[in-house]
Amino acid sequence: MGMTIAEKIIAAAAGEEQVKPGDIHTVELDRLMSNDGTTHLTIDMYHQKLKHPHIADKDKLVWIIDHNVPADSPKTAASHKKMRDFAKEHKITFYEGKGVCHQIMMENHVRPGELIFGADSHTCAYGALGAFGTGVGCTDYLYAMVTGKSWLLVPETLKFNLTNALPKGVYARDLILTIIGQIGANGANYKAMEFGGEGLKTLTMSDRIAICNLCVEAGAKTALMEVDEVALSYLKERGREPKHTFVSDADAVYSKEYQIDLSTIRPIVAKPHFVDHIAEAKECAGVKIDEAFLGSCNNGRLEDLRVGAELLRGRTVHPLVRFLVVPASQEVYQKALEEGLLDIFMKAGAIVMNANCSVCWGSCQGVIGEGETLISTGTRNFKGRAGHADSSVYLASAATVTASAIKGEIATADML
């Protein structure tokens, strides 16, 4: 019986010739990422719970401070110091102030065919490069850190066959929100979401990261894309080689297959308070907003900033709206600076922030107050996600978020 990409990666990591959904295997991990959301808890357990604390392979670890940068309180500062000191003591690869963890991982570390655990749910973003990335809690992370191994239940796979191309003014963000709305927030529970087909070739690496990143919002264990010339070119530019370039076998068995015609996708928003509560953006036109956010590991790349800046060129942010623009990494920030994009944002009245999770995380920069409404390129719109429990978050593409910031109400680019 043939295997899917997810099954092949697990088989390789387990040293098995064949695996099938429902099997449980001990696997060797290629990389372990953790950020300041929970790493301090992992460190506490390392010191307090282990009889013989040690690290199996420090070179597999990547630690990133990105959720509250710079520290917003003495408590956060203490957590950061704990993480910083531990990383220095154990010679762990460490980033601070360089950007959001998943963007940094894609820029500097992820390789096709790898099996990666991340102490963050959006680790599935790594599937854009054909890697099996999945989020784990700090207990599982600690076990993997001290053994180099873990266990995995082989997931079933959902296949999404993409055809044609997205229309002008429609983006990957609209596509993945459409898919989540179609299958539901539980539609891919503990399944792999695999993307392929001729339509995949029309999508950039930025598009692919945005799609895979949000698959966890449908409950996915991981997301994976076929490794093609777009992915290999991205990898080569960054001086890395694939570990494996797996493709699913012709006789691989899928839990379900979906045919997605990219040309039918329209600008979408996810309405409060669930990511699968979607509607065409035009149906929400006129909803007043207080804040707009362009950034996050999902939509803070250079391509997204270009979209926003082009719409803002010659226009201004609505006087009653706070528009926060947050590049996903320092590399993105520097390139946006060189291209003059940040000048456009600032001259238009936007607030350009340092590279970090910012409003998406909702615990530091840009927290919204009681009764306020945010439109965001962040990952989630759960109740209270961005601040007060009595506030509302709409999710949309960079274009819709920017257009809304200009109008002072939810709007699409063609409404400007």
Image: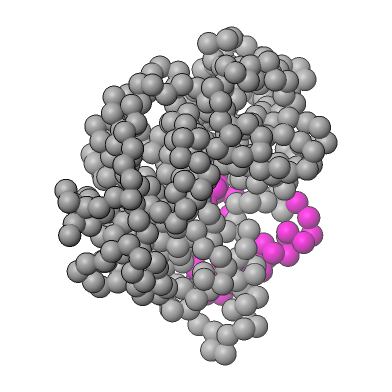
Identify whether 329 is placed above or below 314: below
Q: Residue at x 56, y 21 (%)?
A: 281
User: Looking at the picture, does residue 412 appear above or below residue 268?
Assistant: above
* Quadrant of the frame with the N terminus: bottom left
Residue at the image point whose x is 73% and y is 60% from the top: 77
Give the residue drawn at x 29%, y 24%. 164
Viewer-closest of 254 and 316: 254
Up the image or down, 308 lies above or below 334; here it is: above
- Residue 39 location, x and y as percent? 60, 65
Instruction: Give 309 or 217, whichever is nearer the viewer.
Output: 217
Q: Position of residue 362 (x, y in %)?
A: 69, 44
Looking at the image, residue 391 sits to the left or right of residue 97; the answer is right
Q: Which residue lies furthest to the bottom in this view?
A: 51
Compared with 37, 306 (above or below) is: above
Reply yes or no: does residue 73 show up in magenta: yes
Image side of residue 40 versus residue 214, left or right? right
Let me know if residue 19 appears in the view. yes
Q: Quick check: can you spot residue 351? A: no
- Residue 76: x %, y % from top left: 73, 59
For the record, the magenta segment spans 72-101
Where is residue 193 drawn, in percent x and y? 38, 47
The structure residue drawn at horizontal position 46% and vertical position 73%, both measured from the top left corner, is 144
